[in-house]
Image (cartoon, rainbow, N blue to C red):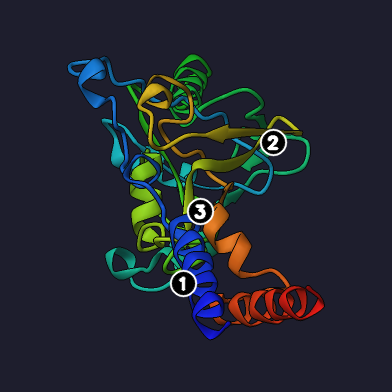
């Protein structure tokens, strides 16, 4: 009877071990990357959204003439941190507008930072305020939130114009071994609408989509794989399963 019991426990343990393994095809990123070799990189054109904070610098051939169109920086000029620059930035209102010196209320609805640069340049020039002005617009509070099965979940700020999805996951220390690479959820807000999508990082197909690059305020959720889900259930480990199976098996043998 003991031999039968031990053999049964061994067999159950082996089956559970097989079930708990994660295959290589579920772990490796971009497994069909060769099919996308030399593919075109899609650049993101992110329109400005409510609560964006903008840094706008205006220069012209006559430096003194451009001074009224620039906000005074908080602190020590070049030494300012991003947080200090945000205090003196232009906050995009719920109506998608900013209050710009002299020009007043300016609509940024549907505009990217490049669009706003061109629009302000043309406006300052056409109204005769400045001669050949140069306008630069920078978004100061770009951030992405990454949750779930990553090494360092949290909200991360970035100052680059664009960062890729893989770069964003790198900020969070990459996925854990328990992260489901085939079930990455991205939540994105565009013009008051919430859009969600699921991405498979083991495939390269998303590299040719609008999700190749992160947009400000994106939320990335990395779901656990089936192995992690199983281990988080009521029966949480192999030893518990073996104990229950042993009791059931012994009961069956005794009844017989």
Which residue is at the front of the view, 138 or 229?
229
Left or right of 160? Residue 6 is right
Q: Quadrant of the N terminus?
A: bottom right
Kindly check if marks 3 and 1 are in contact, taking CB atoms under 8 A apart as contact: no
Q: Nearer the viewer, mark 3 or mark 1?
A: 1
Q: Secondary structure at mark 3?
A: strand
Q: Residues within 10 Å of mark 2 (few under 14, many from 20)?
A: some
Residue plotted at (46% across, 39% down): 214
Residue 88 seen in the current view: no
Which residue is at the front of the view, 15 or 7?
7
Residue 172 position by quadrant: bottom left
Q: Which residue is mark 2?
A: 97
From what the image shows, is residue 110 above or below residue 202? above
| Label located before the other in sequence (1 or 2) | 1
Residue plotted at (63% across, 83% down): 243
Residue plotted at (35% across, 39% down): 25
Q: Which residue is mark 3?
A: 143
Left or right of 71? Residue 51 is right
Q: Secondary structure at mark 1?
A: helix
Residue plotted at (48% across, 30% down): 211
Q: Which residue is mark 1?
A: 10
Q: Secondary structure at mark 2?
A: strand
Q: Residues within 10 Å of mark 1 (few under 14, many from 20)?
A: few
Q: CA distance from mark 1 to mark 2?
A: 69 Å
From what the image shows, is residue 24 above or below residue 212? below
Q: Quadrant of the C terminus?
A: bottom right
Q: Nearer the viewer, mark 1 or mark 2?
A: 1
Q: CA distance from mark 2 to mark 3?
A: 21 Å
Q: Nearer the viewer, mark 2 or mark 3?
A: 3
Which residue is at the front of the view, 29 or 247?
247
Residue 106 seen in the current view: yes
From what the image shows, is residue 103 above or below residue 15? above
């Amino acid at each position: 009877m003991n031999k039968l019991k031990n053999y049964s426990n061994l067999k159950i343990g082996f089956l559970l071990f097989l079930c708990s393994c994660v295959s290589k095809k579920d772990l490796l990123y971009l497994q069909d990357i060769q099919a996308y070799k030399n593919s075109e990189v899609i650049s993101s054109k992110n329109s400005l959204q409510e609560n964006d904070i903008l840094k706008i610098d205006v220069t012209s051939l006559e430096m003194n003439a451009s001074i009224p169109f620039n906000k005074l920086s908080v602190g020590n000029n070049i030494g300012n941190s991003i947080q200090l620059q945000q205090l003196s930035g232009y906050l995009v209102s719920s109506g998608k507008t900013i209050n710009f010196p002299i020009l007043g209320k300016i609509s940024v609805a549907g505009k990217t930072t490049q669009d706003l640069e061109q629009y302000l340049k043309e406006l300052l020039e056409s109204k005769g305020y400045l001669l050949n002005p140069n306008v630069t617009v920078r978004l100061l509070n770009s951030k992405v939130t990454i949750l779930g099965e990553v090494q360092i979940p949290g909200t991360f700020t970035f100052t680059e114009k664009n960062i890729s999805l893989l770069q964003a996951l790198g900020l969070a220390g990459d996925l854990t071994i328990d992260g489901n690479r085939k079930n990455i959820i991205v939540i994105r807000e565009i013009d008051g609408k919430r859009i969600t999508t699921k991405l498979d990082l083991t495939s390269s197909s998303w590299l040719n989509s609008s999700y190749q690059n992160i947009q400000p305020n994106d939320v990335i959720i990395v779901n656990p794989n089936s192995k992690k889900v199983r281990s988080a259930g009521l029966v949480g480990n192999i030893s518990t399963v073996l104990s229950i199976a042993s009791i059931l098996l012994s009961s069956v043998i005794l009844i017989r």
